[in-house]
Image (tube, helix red, strand yellow):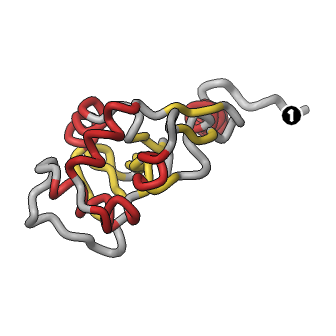
């Protein structure tokens, strides 16, 4: 006679955590838009994985528009995505060179920081601080 796995078994916990992480990621935007396009919209928005409308804070969009050069406005897609991984507990990554350039112009990142292996790394507190300073323009991807 076989018994179902115990709730404390690692496989059960991993599956449950995967389901919860998937729910958290439902709020992520599926079609990231260039800042230049969002600047033209009356109500800057996109759509989430769940199919809901995601509204950008128009004040944040305008601040970014005033602070960044036109070429970068065309290259920078919003929201900025920082990827958290359980394998790297203290840092997160971003695989987007225009994001690094924009954050350097905004003085959120040092110009000494570079792309390594197609991504740049920042500590989680820095990523959360950037997310707090530019609400709706940054999202965190869990379990990547």
Q: Is residue 60 above or below residue 69?
A: above
Q: Position of residue 112 (x, y in %)?
A: 8, 66
Report if residue 116 is visible in the image. yes
Q: Is residue 117 above or below residue 32?
A: below
The residue under label 1 is 2
Q: Position of residue 116 (x, y in %)?
A: 27, 73
Q: Is residue 33 above or below residue 114?
A: above
Measuring 28% from the left and 45% from the top, which residue is drawn there? 64
Report if residue 85 is visible in the image. no
Q: In this rendered view, identify the residue nearer to me: 128 or 9.
A: 128
Measuring 20% from the left and 49% from the top, which residue is drawn there? 67
Q: Position of residue 90 (x, y in %)?
A: 26, 44
The N terminus lies in which quarter of the figure?
Answer: top right
Q: Secondary structure at mark 1?
A: loop
Residue furthest bottom as drawn = 117
Measuring 50% from the left and 35% from the top, which residue is drawn there? 42
Measuring 42% from the left and 49% from the top, which residue is drawn there? 81
Q: Position of residue 137 (x, y in %)?
A: 38, 40
């Amino acid at each position: 006679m076989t018994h179902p796995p115990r709730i404390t078994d690692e496989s059960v916990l991993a599956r449950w955590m995967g389901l919860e992480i998937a729910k958290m990621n439902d709020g992520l935007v599926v079609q990231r838009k260039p800042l230049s396009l969002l600047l033209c919209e009356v109500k800057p928005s996109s759509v989430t994985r769940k199919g809901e409308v995601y509204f950008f804070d128009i004040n944040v969009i305008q601040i970014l528009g005033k602070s960044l050069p036109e070429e970068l406005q065309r290259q920078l897609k919003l929201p900025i995505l920082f990827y958290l991984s359980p394998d790297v507990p203290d840092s997160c990554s971003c695989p987007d060179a225009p994001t690094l350039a924009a954050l350097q112009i905004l003085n959120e990142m040092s110009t000494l920081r570079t792309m390594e292996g197609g991504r740049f790394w920042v500590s989680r507190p820095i990523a959360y601080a950037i997310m707090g300073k530019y609400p709706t323009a940054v999202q965190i991807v869990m379990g990547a």
